[in-house]
């Protein structure tokens, strides 16, 4: 399953920076676990895991992402 940053997460913002990954690439995650912190010009938001599994990071800390961007995959 793809971890997608959508407009619901970003609110009215059009882009966000990946400020910090809270997990390591290849680690096991649980549903609802905090994965990453995103920073917009207005707020910092946390993205949680939609499911349990092993995560593969696609985006890196410091990357600027837009709505619809896939930042990781969980299998």
Image (cartoon, helix red, strand yellow):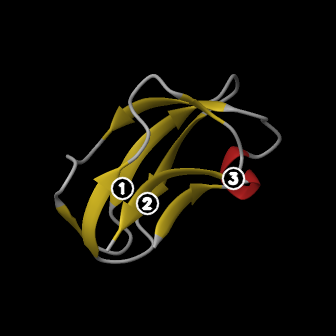
Lower position in the chain sequence, tag 3 or tag 2: 2
Q: Measured along the vertical axis of the image, is residue 28 above or below residue 45?
A: below
Residue 57 on image: x %, y %: 34, 48
Residue 21 on image: x %, y %: 33, 39
Residue drawn at x 64%, y 29% as measured from the top left: 40
Tell me the quarter of the image containing the C terminus: bottom left
The residue nearer to you, when weighing 51 against 69, is 69
Residue 39 on image: x %, y %: 56, 30
Query: Are the residues tagged 1 and 2 within 8 Å (C-beta)?
Result: yes
Tell me the quarter of the image containing the N terminus: bottom left
Q: Which residue is mark 3?
A: 68
Question: Dot 1: few (<14), some (14–19), or many (≥20) neighbours within 10 Å?
Answer: some
Lower position in the chain sequence, tag 1 or tag 2: 1
Q: Measured along the vertical axis of the image, is residue 44 above or below residue 7?
A: above
Q: Does dot 2 land on a helix, a strand or a loop?
A: strand
Callout in the foreground (3, 2): 3
Q: Does dot 1 land on a helix, a strand or a loop?
A: strand
* Cα distance between the residues tagged 1 and 2: 4 Å
């Amino acid at each position: 399953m793809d971890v997608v940053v959508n407009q619901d997460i970003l609110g009215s913002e059009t882009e966000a920076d990946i400020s910090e990954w809270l997990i390591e690439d290849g680690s096991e995650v649980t549903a609802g676990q905090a994965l990453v912190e995103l920073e917009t010009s207005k707020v910092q938001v946390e993205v949680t895991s939609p499911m349990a599994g092993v995560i593969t990071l696609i985006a890196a800390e410091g990357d600027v992402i837009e709505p619809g961007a896939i930042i990781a995959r969980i299998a």
